[in-house]
Amino acid sequence: MNYWPLLGVAVIVVGFALRFNAVPVVVCAALLSGLLAGLPLPVLLALLGKSFVSGRMLLLFVLTLPAIGLLERAGLREHAQRWMARLQGMTLARLLIGYLLLRQLLAMLGLTGVAGAAQTVRPLLAPMTEAAAEKILPTLDDTDRDELRAIAAATDNIGRFFGEDVFIALGAVLLIQGFYAQHGIALTPLAIALWALPTAIAAFVIQSVRVWLVQRRLQRRAARVRAGEAS
Amino acid sequence: MLRIEYAYWLIAAFLIYAGWRNLRDRHLWHAAFWLLLGVLFGGGDYVLAQQAAGNALPAQLAGAGVIMLALLAPRLRRQAHPESSSPAQRLASAIRLGHRLFVPALLIPLVTLLVALFGAYLVIAGHAVFAAPQMTLTGLALACVVALFAASRVAHVPMREGVAEGRRLLDAIGWAALLPLLLAALGQVFTQSGVGAAIAGLAGMLLPTGSALACLLAFALGMVLFTVIMGNAFAAFPVMMAGIGLPLLIRQYGADPAILGSMGMLCGYCGTLLTPMAADFNLVPAALLELRSPYGVIRAQVGSALAILATTIVLMWLLVFR
């Protein structure tokens, strides 16, 4: 067994830990691992080039930028914030938990590409989240805003991840089924997908509780601010 | 017939436009970076076709291009383009346009959804409108074009202004946009170099085999750790399954394969929430939302990921050995 290619993993860990620019770190790790595995340089270059262009769908999100940029210039985020401020009964927790539920259900139907950081979080969910938080505590600082946007993105990710495994025709379930089939264990995709449900429910409950805790923390801070003003 | 390749050409055109605008603004490093990336996107189909035909030269040139991009990336300083509109202008426009602003924004998910659900049935003059591979993503690309058109109608602004705004956002995201592709390529190189096999070999030496619980914990935490390293639970699954899951948990201790496979994969998903290697879910959103820390999204996910992981491990322990 040749253990030398593992140095590529070490390059990644050290590079990320020292906060170097991630792009050269990743390329160095790939070159190092390949060379230590004894791949000739021309083969390694071709492998790198071919794998890179095969992953082009991962940059598809940039196509959303012109429409979103134009809408933001025309006041989309300002409108989303004003609308949230007017909506009675739409709290921070209800907004994010509602989005989480919707995202999980869509992912369970295999519709993962419908929402995402570029499609829905940046133009809609993040400004609404900030506006819902402003209803509780009008004096949010930049750290609060960063944290709220990050929670919106985290809610989107968790909804997607713990929904998509319940869908029978998607990568994960088929990969599991394929692995077992190679090793002589026959399972239907449905039998595998159903066992993702308990974790899907647990993920929904856990993220909902965390969102609710964030809301409660803001409410307490707001109460302290009001108490400070009154005294 | 609409194919995913058209979306790639559209991306290439947008990248080359961004490069050209940066060239005119004398931001030479940005210009070189986006132009080179645009050429790689435009030439991608040619590279893959030639590679399949046995000519490796274009793929080698693409590999050299990736190394060039890595050399250029540290030169890209995050430059704050001046906002093209003032907050007061945006507020006035928001009040004037109202809910109409939501229509183009919602068209992106809506058109994607319609194509994903009904694209397969759309036939014009005997030809399918959408090619079957990657239909949802083709739908997303179409949705972006439709939304840009709708946005320019709603806001009474020409579409090229939208493309210029898009370039402003692209420059703000910078090299982080590239990471998902690079990490996917790294995964392939790791696989070809036998990194997975080496880790499995190391794990085999350290493994406890004494009790079912120790094996189960090693399997679940191994899924998390391997996913954190590779950025992808799909890469971790076959390795951990072949190393621990199949020989020990299923064959020796009689674990239920359906439950073990499904929940083991979900342990890996918890790892995905924790790692910068899953750049498309963790680093790109941080850049898109203009967070000051690139690890802000991961930080917001740690608590949930660990709680979901603990729950899943307990569920596995209760369920797999019934």
Image (cartoon, grey):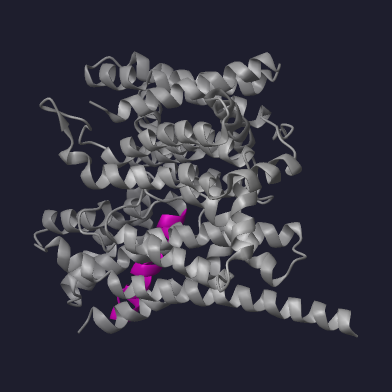
Q: Position of residue A44 (x, y in %)?
A: 39, 27
**x and y percentages locating residue A84 in the rendered image:** 59, 62
Residue drawn at the location 10% of the way across and 63% of the way down: A185
Q: Residue at x 75, y 66 (%)?
A: A138
The magenta span reads B206-228
Q: Is residue A223 left or right of residue B294?
A: right
x, y percent for residue B316: 30, 77
User: B40 or B151: nearer the eye?
Assistant: B151
Q: Is residue A187 above or below residue B290?
A: below
Q: Is residue B17 left or right of residue B26?
A: left
Asked whether residue B204 is in view, the answer is no
Q: Is residue B212 magenta?
A: yes
Whether residue A52 is visible here, answered yes or no, is: yes
Height in image: B163 above or below B176? above
Residue projecting furthest to the right = A231
Q: Is residue B55 magenta?
A: no
Give the vertical position of A28 relative to B112 (above or below). above
Name the residue at the front extreme: B96
Residue A59 place in picture, x, y as percent: 45, 35
Identify which residue is drawn at 16% across, 71% down.
Answer: B251
Asked where in the image residue A143 lies, by quadrant, the reply is bottom right
Picture quarter containing residue A57? top left
Query: Which residue is more in the foreground, B131 or B253?
Result: B131
Up/down of B4 relative to B45, above or below: below
SS majority, magenta: helix
Report the residue at 67% width, 18% height from top.
B28
